[in-house]
Amino acid sequence: VTASVEERQYRIGEVAERVGITPRTIRYYEERGLLGAESTRPKGGHRLYTDADVTRLTELIRLRDLLGLSLEELTGLAEAEEARAALRDRWDDTESDSERLRIVEAVIPLIERQLTLVEARQRTLAEFGAELKAKLESLHERRRELSRP
Amino acid sequence: VTASVEERQYRIGEVAERVGITPRTIRYYEERGLLGAESTRPKGGHRLYTDADVTRLTELIRLRDLLGLSLEELTGLAEAEEARAALRDRWDDTESDSERLRIVEAVIPLIERQLTLVEARQRTLAEFGAELKAKLESLHERRRELSRP
DNA sequence: TTGCTCCTCACGTCACGTGAGGTGGC
DNA sequence: TTGCTCCTCACGTCACGTGAGGTGGC
């Protein structure tokens, strides 16, 4: 597949550093089918990635870290990123308007699911934080009582 | 160790269910030194836990799940729960006021560290949520454009 | 040509999951 | 006594970490 515009390519080490993971993780995700290996790569040849790949990986890692999802759960939500990437990359290409509409309408519920998960976690975290603050308050209180002569 | 008040005791399965984990996880934490096995238990005898143990475990699991901490990192923060439990359990016991003050002043910075971690995660989650909402907005916009005749 | 990064096995590790076979308390 | 839950190995799994030995591009 040849791009009309000459796009900057990255090697696995640079991608890993930008995303904040190791090359091993990227290879593992590819091995498990999460990243879609380029079929063009010759056996033993170096892997090459685009800016879109970096964005996609960053999103995946964020979902993994912030929501604690397994790779299997990630695979489901990752479809959203794939479709969004398809939207972004092929927006000006040969896709028809009806095809674009189909992609948009497929992506919306996936992003909504992500948002639901994030908001649920935000609520439990807020609750936890409130409890910690209450604990701190009562500890300070006790310290004041014990410090009094 | 005999308690002055007859305290309700729980077996590992009941504790696991209340905390939302499996008995295996509890045994593993004990094996790794996170839970402090009762030295009184005979080899092969059943493990028994108190309400204080359940509370402690719940806090540990919450830190693990919400912050994604490793068991080694948990061990550090767990000292806070241990000390707080000591405070709660032995508050009316033989401890002197100076000893109580020492415990309180040891616990405060540990809870503060927990709060710092929780607040940091709250911020990144809020940022993520905002990005997701922005994405949804632009997707809805695109859908409107494409749906227009 | 020299480094550097990359490649593919392949074994190790962390945090448990999952039986296998056996013992203990209401 | 009968179930049920518990016990201790011990091997399996998931998500990578970590070399071992070798090849590829500026």
Image (cartoon, coloured by chain):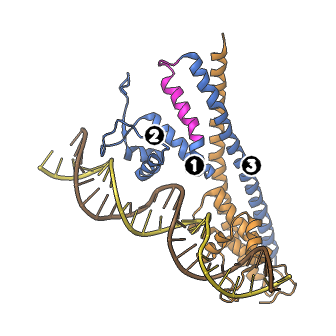
Chain colours: A blue, B orange, C yellow, D brown
The residue shown at (87%, 84%) is B6
Q: Mark 1 lies on which chain?
A: A
| Quadrant location, the C terminus of chain A | bottom right
Q: How many labels, in total?
A: 3
**Picture quarter containing residue B78?**
bottom right
Q: What stretch is highlighted in magenta?
A: A77-95
In the image, residue A94 lies in the stretch drawn in magenta: yes
Residue with the mark numbered 2: A36
Q: Position of residue A66 (x, y in %)?
A: 61, 49
Check the image and report above or below for D16 versus A44: below
Q: Nearer the viewer, residue A8 or B13?
A: B13
Q: How far apart are marks 3 and 2 (CA)?
A: 34 Å
- Asked if labels 3 and 2 share a chain, the reply is yes
Q: In this view, does C2 lie to the left or right of B92?
A: left
**Do pointers 1 and 3 mark residues of a single chain?**
yes
Secondary structure at numbered mark 2 = loop
Q: Mark 3 points at which residue?
A: A123
Instruction: Identify the residue at horizontal 64%, vertical 26% (top origin).
Output: A105
